[in-house]
Image: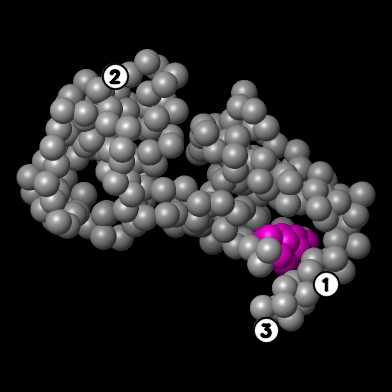
Amino acid sequence: MRLIRFLSYWFFAISLAATTAGAETWKIASPEWPPYAGAQLPENGRAIEKLRTILRNAGVTLVVEFMPWSRAQSIAASADYVGYFPAREQDVCEEFATTHPVIFSKVGVIKREETTLEWSGLDVLFENYRIGFVASHVYPPEIQRQIYRHYQPEDGTENEEDLARILSAGRVEAALMDPEVLFHIADRLSLNGIDPDPRILEQLPLVLALFKSEGYERRMNLLNALLNEASAQ
């Protein structure tokens, strides 16, 4: 059964690719979000590298323009772009369609080295410790509920870099963030005192948000077929 499903995905991908091979370019907007995406990163980051490789298998050339998160989301809603990536599924608005996950990010609890956290659930964690978070992020529902319930304005930061800084400075005992992003920031800024062993809460899908312009459904079907093929291998 698995072989049949794999062959179906494969033939579907090949048939779609045949209509675009060697002649199609997808231009996307991308936020600067190391280590997943960035103009100065090797291969433009792990997420961009994976998307580019998958599309190359269908003869599609990926062109990426890097910019801040808010600009990437707004400028991608134009005829010059097919969409933006990486996109957090929960942040994608109705103007865009989401593909299958291309790669996964994480959300975890990262603490200071000298801090001992004893908790059996998120309610216990928030009740007993100061937990930092990025105020503009939409976290998974249970985490977001705890943030609202125990909200302290001084524990919310404008961005991930600020959150890494206040964790390193000891202004919070732990932070809710993607560990790979935090560790990348800590290394770049030479921040100290951060425990290298995070506790992962959830994996979060990163998708390509396709602007609902002419041809977006064909693009979505093509990429989804390629992703299905890759996951079946």
Q: Is residue 185 above or below residue 173?
A: above
Badge 1 crowding class, 10 Å Cα cut-off, few under 14, some 14 to 19, many 20 or more, is few
Query: Based on the displayed image, in which of its 4 quarters is residue 61 positioned?
Result: top right
Considering depth in this image, is 209 or 170 the residue closer to the camera? 170
Query: Based on the displayed image, in which of its 4 quarters is residue 14 positioned?
Result: bottom right
- Identify residue for label 2: 192
- Identify residue for label 3: 1
Residue 49: tell me if it is visible. Answer: yes
The location of residue 3, given as percent across then percent down, is 72, 77
Left or right position of 158 against 180? left
Tell me which amino acid carries mark 1. Answer: Phe
Residue drawn at x 7%, y 45% as measured from the top left: 128
Q: Give how far apart the Cα atoms at labels 1 and 3 are.
A: 15 Å
Badge 2 crowding class, 10 Å Cα cut-off, few under 14, some 14 to 19, many 20 or more, is some
Tell me which amino acid carries mark 2. Answer: Asn
Magenta-drawn segment? 215-230
Q: Is residue 166 above or below residue 131?
A: above
The numbered mark, 1 or 2, whose residue comes first in the sequence reads 1
The location of residue 168, given as percent across then percent down, is 25, 23
Badge 3 crowding class, 10 Å Cα cut-off, few under 14, some 14 to 19, many 20 or more, is few
Residue drawn at x 39%, y 17% as measured from the top left: 189
Left or right position of 168 against 36? left
Residue drawn at x 80%, y 48% as measured from the top left: 56
Could you tell me if the residues under marks 1 and 3 are in contact, i.e. CB atoms within 8 Å? Answer: no
Left or right position of 151 against 98? left
Q: Judge depth for marks 3 and 2 and give the one in front.
A: 3
Q: Which mark is residue 11?
A: 1
